[in-house]
Amino acid sequence: MTVVEFTRLLEKEFEDIEEGTLIPSMNYREIPEFSSMHALILIALIDSEFDVLLNGEDLRSVNTIEELFNLVTERL
Amino acid sequence: MNSGFLLTYYLPDNVVTNEELADQFPDVTPEQIFKQSGVRKRYLTNPDEIGSDLACKAAKKLFSENESLVVEEIDLLVMCTLSPDFKAPSTSVFVHEQLGLREDCLSIDVPMGCSGYIYGLSLIKAMITAGLVKNALFLLAETSSHATHSEDLYLRMIFSDGASATYISKEGVDKIGDFVFGTDGKGAKSLFVDRSATRNPVDQKWITQYKDEPGNMLNGRMYMNGAEIVTFAIRRVPKLLAETLEKNNLNFEDIDLFIFHQASGFILHVLRRKCKIPEDKFFVYLEEVGNTVSSSIPIALKEAIVQGKAKRGMKIMLLGYGIGYTWGGTVIKL
């Protein structure tokens, strides 16, 4: 999976976000309406798609969608 | 279910709907609350109604629903609550008194929260099997609302006050399988009630800080780190399921119904998907009642029986997991 595909996956999972809205350099916390619930969705999505289980500290250690993607791929 | 394993539940009178919650939090809609929690209604006690009151009401309901149950034959009372009457003595002695149980009845507390039903069942099975007692009354009651701050929307979305009562005799114990348990104290602060006992007790500063909050948070304040709880559940519960199958010499296909602790709609959705459980074998009773902590499994089990989803002869896996962290699993045969 590429970072662009990962970004599209986030758009799909967050439901209310139109395709093409997110870009890899965006801080994932600045995704419109981002809440603590979305952090939970991220953890579950990444576990389901990559079999990589992140915790809250992992999420706090990165900012952009690309950094999040890199963190995941490092653990594959 | 046979007459050796009887159960019921009791919910307090005050219902809080998503519409009522949304009125207090203008940034969210009732549908958003449902999407985030999986809950449409939750129940609250009155401020002067505590865990043992709910437990006694559940017990009396069980007695009135089952003529075959002889109260005088109960010689073990297990009380599971994280909402005790006092630090001492145990809540079970107050419940014992209120219910008028016999004097030689052993009464103990098992304050285990989300995994409490599994832990209590194991204790009861062990004591009855060892011949120490014959007939057990297992009460579980929580009033988590008493430790929830009015601004903590997510906690108010998912948690509900409630109680359950289960009666187990020798005949019922024979239907309870083997158990798996686990503890990981590193998760103790992921879901906990601060300022609720002797470590960091409530002080003057705390009282001043919460002087405008109903109840003044004198029972402490519940905190939850949702990300850590979800990570724990995803990591631990699928293993717990596999270990519980192995312990009971069963295959996945042998289980007719799975009843997990009803943590939240999101966690149940993620776990069902992760564990690859077909929807028709995964019983959820959350929308109408919320997360009642230790009573969530017995309430769901009772509803599964009432709705005809749990039938005589079925093998049902019960998995508890959460606060602590602690976890436990078993299989019962109806």
Image (tube, rainbow, N blue to C red):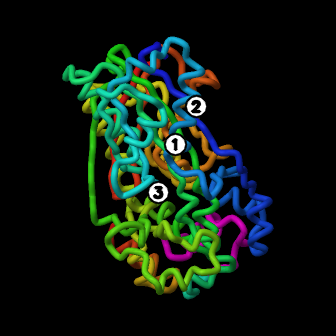
Q: Is B21 left or right of B94, judged from the image as shown?
A: right
Question: Dot 2 falls on which chain?
Answer: B
Find the magenta span and give its range: A1-22
Judge by depth and name the residue closer to the eye, A13 or B104: B104
Disc 3 and disc 2 on one polypeptide chain? no
Per the image, the residue denoted by label 2 is B280
Judge by depth and name the residue closer to the eye, B31 or A58: B31
Q: Is residue A7 magenta?
A: yes
Disc 1 and disc 2 on one polypeptide chain? yes
Point out which mark residue B296 bears. Answer: 1
Secondary-structure class at tag 2: helix
Amino acid type for the residue under numbered disc 1: Ser
Question: Dot 3 falls on which chain?
Answer: A
Can you give x and y, in whole percent of width and height, for residue A18 in the image? 73, 72
Per the image, the residue denoted by label 3 is A48
Give the answer, above or below, for where B46 lies relative to B175.
below
Question: Looking at the image, which residue is at 52% across and 46% down?
Answer: B262
Query: Label 3: few (<14), some or many (≥20) within 10 Å?
Result: some
Judge by depth and name the residue closer to the eye, B282 or B126: B126
Secondary-structure class at tag 3: helix
Question: Dot 1 falls on which chain?
Answer: B
Q: CA distance from mark 1 to mark 2?
A: 19 Å
Q: CA distance from mark 1 to mark 3?
A: 26 Å
Can you give x and y, in whole percent of width and height, for residue B310 in the image? 54, 23
Q: Is B30 left or right of B234, judged from the image as shown?
A: right
Q: Is residue A57 magenta?
A: no
Query: Label 2: few (<14), some or many (≥20) within 10 Å?
Result: few
**Tally of numbered tags:** 3
Give the answer, above or below, for where B234 lies relative to A63.
above
Question: Looking at the image, which residue is at 27% across and 62% down?
Answer: B185
Amino acid type for the residue under numbered disc 2: Asp
